[in-house]
Image (cartoon, coloured by chain):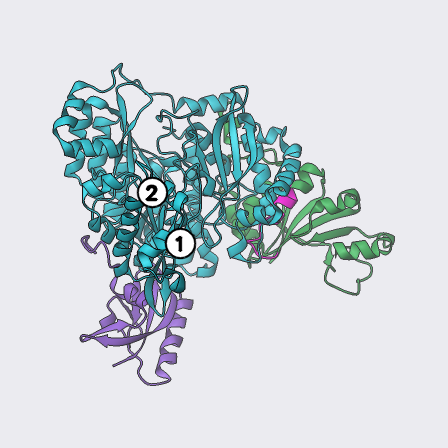
Amino acid sequence: MYRYDEFDHTLVAERIATFRRQVQRRLSGDLTEDQFKPLRLMNGLYLQLHAYMLRVNIPYGCLSARQLRQLAYIARRYDRNFGHFTTRQNIQYNWIRLDETPDVLAALAEVEMNAMQSSGNCVRNITADQYAGRARDEVEDPRPWCELIRQWSILHPEFSYLPRKFKIAVSGAPVDRAAVKFHDVGLYLRRNADGVVGFEVIAGGGQGRLPYVGHTIRDWLPKEDLLSYLEAILRIYNLGGRRDNPQKARIKVQVNALGPDEFRRLVDEEWAQIRRSALLAVPRAEIERIAAYFADPAWEVLADDPVAVTRQRGVDPGFDDWYRANVVAHRTPGYAIVNLSLKAPGIAPGDLTADQMDKVADLADRFSIGELRVSHRQNLVFPDVRQGDLPALWQELRALSLATPNIGQLTDIIACPGLDFCSLANARAIPVAQDLSRHFGDAAVLQDVGELTINISGCMNACGHHHVGNIGILGVEKNGQEFYQLTLGGSSGEDASLGDRLGRSISAADVPPAIDAIVARYRALRLADERFLDTYRRVGIEPFKEAVYGARAREVA
Amino acid sequence: MGLVRGGSLVPDPFTDASSLGELPAGVPLIISLEQWQVRRDELLARGQPLGLRLRSDQSPTRIADDLAHFAVVALEFPKYRDGRAYTHARILKERLGYTGEIRAVGDVLQEQLHFMQRCGFNSFDVVAPDAEQAWRTVAGDHTVWYQATGDGRPRALDRRHRR
Amino acid sequence: MTGQMILANRLTDGRVVFLAADGRWVDDIAGGAVATAPGVASQLLATARVAESRNAVIEPCLIDIRQVAGHRQPVAWREAIRATGPTVRTDLPA
Ligand code: SF4
C-alpha cells in the first residue's frame, strides 16, 4: 500500500489546520452557513436529514488493517458505532458533530487517510478495480497510476472550482469491475498492437438524471502522458462545461453536446500545447517510488487447490456455496481473493459495525497480510488469502455474518442511504434492500439464478447505480408516498448498458413480488446457463413487462 | 474591501470603467473587451495606462496580440464557484507570456486566494472587510503542493527527488 | 390537533431540533411549540430566523404536524423521518 511521506503528511496536516480555523470561524459566527458550506463540503462534511455526515476516502479501495481499526475507533468515539461503505470506495459516518470534525480528520490523518475532496465541484476519490494487483485477467496493476492521479488532483489550484464534481475510475483488467464507463473519465490499462501498455481513455460517462455510457476519446495513451492528457481534459471541461444549470454541468453533457469527435479535437488541441510541459512531467524515479509501494508481497510458494479445501468442498455444501460465490482466482498459485459480503439477509447494504471492523481487521492480519479492499458494490475483499486457510477463514467470517454466499448475485444488492439519511432522497432504499435480501434468502434459489445485480437508488442522483443494475430500482415520490420505478438490462461492466424502464412505478410492498415475477420469467426463458442480462438482451423487455404488470402491461405502462 | 498586492493593501491607480458608457478623462482606466474592440484608437490616444477586464467567458487568447497595451488584466469571478478564471490566468501567464498585473476581481474570497496566486494572479480585489488581514490569515496555509504551475514553486515530487 | 412547528438542524452537531415556546431548541418533538392560530406560526418562524442569524441552527423550516395515536407527527414523510430518526439501524445505540 502507498505510505505517506513527510510531504503527504504535511499537506494533510495543513489542510486540517485550515479547516479547524474555518470551523472555529463558523462556530463563532464569523462565517455564515452560505459561506461555510462550500468549505465543509471540500472537507467531506455534509448536512443530512438528521445530522452531519462525513465522507472519508478509501483511495482506489485500498485499506490496511490498521486503518480499519482506526475507522472502528472513529465509529465508536465520534459516531454511532457503524460506518457505511458507498459505491465510490468511501466510508460515510452519519452522526459526526461539526465541532469534533477537525479531530476526526486528525484521527484519520494518523493512519494516512483523509476526507479531502470527497465532496465539492472537484476531482473526487479515484476509484479502481477491487481486485487490482491480484486479478488473473489483469494487464497491469492500476494502483500506482491511481496514486499518481490522486496526488495530481488534490488541491489542484486550477481545478478546485469545476462546473461540477469529477469522478475518475481506473481498471487494469479487461473485465470491468469498477464501472469505468460510467465515470467522468474512465481509464483501462490496455496493450497496443506492439504489446506496450497504455491507457484507453473514456470520457463523458455518468449516471444521475442524465445517464450516459462514456465515449472512448483515445484508444491508447502512453502511460507517461497520463497527467498532461488528464490536465487537457480538465481544462477543456473547466472552460466549456455548463455553469448555468447544475443538472447539466457534468462533463457528460459537454461531451455529448459537442459530440465525442469535437470533444476529442478540443482535448487534443490543448494537449498538444501542454504535452511536453515540464510542469506536468513525472520523472521515472517518482513512478518507481510509487510503484514500489505496490510491489508484490512475499507470497509463499504454494500449489493450487490444496487437498483439504477440495475435501471440505465435497463434504460441506455451505462451504462449497461460499467458495463458488465469494472466492475468486488469484494470479499467484495457492492464493485466493476472498469477498466478504456486507449483504447478509436483513442488513443495510454496505454497513459495518465498529465491532465487525475490529474483527475484520484482525482477520485481515491473520489471513490476508494485513490488507483489504473495498468494492464499489459495497463489499470488502481480502486480496491475499492462502487457499489452505479458506476453511478456517470461512468459519470466522460466518461468525461475523460476513460469509453470505451471494457475491454478484440477486441479494448482493447495492443500495444508497436513501430517505433514511439523505437530504436529497425521494424514497427509502435500505428497507427495500432488506426486504429483498430476506425474501431471496434461499441459497439454492440464489445459486440457480446466478449472476444478477440489483441496484437501488433513493432518487435520480443514482448513487445506488440503479441505471446499471441488471435490475434497477429507483425510489420516487408520488403524493407524499414512496414508489419504486424498475429498470431492466443495465450493466456497469465492459459490456456497459443503461437499464430500460419497465413500466409504472410500484409500492414498496409490491417490489419483492415484482422481482419474483421477473426472476421466474427469466428462469423460464433462459437458454442453458445464460445469464439474466443475456436473456434480457435476447428476448427484450416485453416478457418481463407482462410478468410484472400482467396482460394489460402495454396499456398501463 | 481593497486591493492587495505583494501582501499589502495598495492604492489602486485604475478606475474601472468597464461598465461605464462615458469614460472618465485623465485617469488610467480598466475597460471591457467590448470597449477595447470598439474604441481602440480613442483609448490608445489617451496616453494613459490601460487595464482590461475580462468576463469568465472571455478567454485571454482573444487578445493575445494586444496584451502589450495593458498594464493590468483583470479576470472576473462572477461567483467564487465559477473557476474559469483560474484557467484564464494560467493561459495568460504561462502560454501568452503576459508579465503584467493579473488581478482577481468579483467574488474574490479569502479561501480562494491561495489557488489564485498559484495560477498567476498577483493582485486581488478582496471582498473581505479587512483584505490585508484576509491575506495574512491564509498566506501560511500551505507549504506543500502536488502540482506545478507557472509560479515556479516546486511540487512535492520535485522535492522528493532533489538530492 | 393539527398545527405547525419549527424544525431545524443544530449548528454544533447537526441534530434535528424543534423550537420550544420559550425560544430554546429541544431534541424531542413533544417539547416543541405548536402553532395552531394564524399569525403564531409566522412569529415562530421569525424567532427561528433570528436564531439562524445568530448561528444556533441551520435552515429552520415550518412543518405541518398532526396527532397520530396521541403523538405529534410531521405530516410530510420526509420530516417524519427527520423527527424520529432513520427507520433502519434501530439496533444501534442513539
Ligand atoms: S441516490 Fe439520491 S437518495 Fe441516494 S444517496 Fe444519492 S442523493 Fe441520496
Parent chain of label 2: A
Mark sitting on residue A24: 1
Label number found at residue A533: none
Of residues C82 and B6, the one nearer the viewer is C82
Horizontal and vertical percent position of residue A84: 30, 47
Chain depicted in green: B
In the rendered structure, the answer to whether residue A428 lies left or right of residue B119 reads: left
Residue A388 in sight from this viewpoint: yes
The amino acid type found where label 2 is placed reads Phe
List the residue tagged with mark 2: A532
Can you tell me which quadrant of the image ligand 1 is in? bottom left
Q: Earlier in the sequence, mark 2 or mark 1?
A: 1
- Report the label total: 2
Q: Pick the quarter of the image with the C terminus of chain A.
A: bottom left
Q: Which residue lies furthest to the left in this view?
A: A315
Write the residue at 73% across / 59% down: B18
Does the image show residue A457? no
The quadrant where residue A295 appears = top left
In terms of secondary structure, where does tag 1 sit? helix
**Image position, residue A288 (x, y; %):** 46, 21
Q: Which chain carries label 1?
A: A
Mark 2 crowd level (few <14, some 14–19, many ≥20, 10 Å Cα): many
User: Magenta stretch containing residue A3, yes or no?
Assistant: no
Mark 1: which amino acid?
A: Gln
User: Spatial distance from mark 2 to mark 1, Cα to Cα?
Assistant: 54 Å
Label 2 close to label 1 by CB (< 8 Å): no
Color of chain C here? Answer: purple
Q: Chain A is drawn in which colour?
A: cyan
The image quarter containing residue A390 is top left
Tell which of A503 and A346 is nearer to you.
Answer: A503
Q: Give the range drawn in magenta.
A: B78-90
Residues tagged by mark 2 and mark 1 found on one chain of the structure: yes
